[in-house]
Image (cartoon, rainbow, N blue to C red):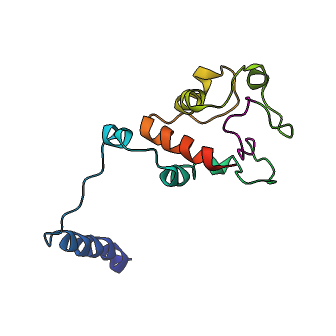
Amino acid sequence: MKAKSLIFPFLLAILMAACSKGEAVAPLPSTEERLAAPADAAYGQYLFRECAICHERSPGAGNRVGPNLWGVYGQPAASNENFAYSGAMRRADLVWDDDNLDKFLERPGALVPGTRMSFGGEKDPANRRDIIAYLKTLK
């Protein structure tokens, strides 16, 4: 047991030594810098990993806890005929465009009160924009 407790400090020391050799590490871009750049669908796909727990995103795939999102961009809300949407979502008079997707991803229950989507929301507007860019590719 004592040998195992020495492994982490040893690995940490190696990592710190590697980082202290004067190699510059580029700082992460700020949200403002990311918003000034074009949307990044590839990064949106990376961020979508959290969404993929509940949503399929390929043609012909079934639904999960949430509906399959293939072709969702530009479609009316609750338009997947094979998914049992909440009454709130069925009553929502929305088209999934940039503005509505941005609002929904920021705080689903604020745009569609009573939605069953349990996702708490994505606070970073650059992340939302990149996820939307990825959703646009699903066609």
**Residue appearing at x 65%, y 19% in the figure:** 113
Furthest residue toward right: 82
**How many dots with numbers?**
0
Spot occupied by residue 75 in the image (x, y as percentages of width and height): 72, 33
Furthest residue toward bottom: 3
Q: Is residue 9 left or right of residue 111?
A: left
Answer yes or no: is residue 124 visible.
Answer: no
Q: Give the vertical position of 60 relative to 18 (above or below).
A: above
The N terminus sits in image quarter: bottom left
* Magenta stretch, overall SS: loop
Furthest residue toward left: 22
Task: Decide which of 32, 85 is in the foreground and name it.
Answer: 32
User: Which quadrant holds residue 60?
Assistant: bottom right
**Residue appearing at x 76%, y 47% in the figure:** 64
Answer yes or no: is residue 10 visible.
Answer: yes
User: Which quadrant holds residue 93?
Assistant: top right
**Residue appearing at x 74%, y 25% in the figure:** 89
**Residue appearing at x 69%, y 21% in the figure:** 114
| Magenta stretch, residue numbers | 66-77
Q: Is residue 89 left or right of residue 25?
A: right
Q: Is residue 88 magenta?
A: no
Spot occupied by residue 128 in the image (x, y as percentages of width and height): 50, 38
Spot occupied by residue 70 in the image (x, y as percentages of width and height): 72, 47
